[in-house]
Amino acid sequence: MPVKAWTNVADSGDAVALVKELAPSFGGRISDVPVHNGAKAHDVRPYLTARETGRAIGRALARRP
């Protein structure tokens, strides 16, 4: 099944996530959502506990058949 939508969650200070905005390259299928992870910009815990990440997961689960 092809990906219909993608939420790109990125912290501006995350040196590993070099490109923070993917929507310009992939069009309407991508939604760029900035987060602020504080001093742990690349740590998985702030990403997974961010409200923005929770909202993206909730929207994806609501679209399931």
Image (spheres, rainbow, N blue to C red):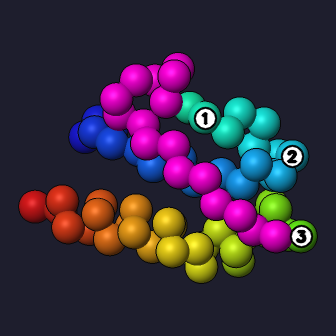
Q: Describe the element under mark 2 as helix, strand or loop.
A: loop
The image shows residue 10, relative to residue 5, as above or below, that is below
Q: Describe the element under mark 3 as helix, strand or loop.
A: loop
Q: Quadrant of residue 20?
A: top right
Residue 15: which numbered mark, if any?
A: 2
Q: CA distance from mark 3 to mark 2?
A: 12 Å
Q: Which residues are magenta?
A: 23-38
**Quarter of the image that includes the C terminus:** bottom left
Magenta residue check for 22: no
Residue 8 horizontal/vertical position (percent) = 53, 47
**Which residue lies most toward the left here?**
65
Asked whether 39 or 8 is in front, the reply is 39
Question: Of the residues under marks 1 and 2, which one precedes in the sequence?
Answer: 2
Question: Identity of the amino acid at label 1?
Answer: Glu
**Seen in the image, is 60 located left or right of residue 18?**
left
Q: CA distance from mark 1 to mark 2?
A: 14 Å
Asked whether 16 or 3 is in front, the reply is 16
Residue 39: which numbered mark, if any?
A: 3
Residue positioned 53% across, 51% down in the render: 33
Question: Identity of the amino acid at label 3?
Answer: Ala
How many residues crowd around disc 1 within 10 Å: few (fewer than 14), some, or many (20 or more)?
A: some
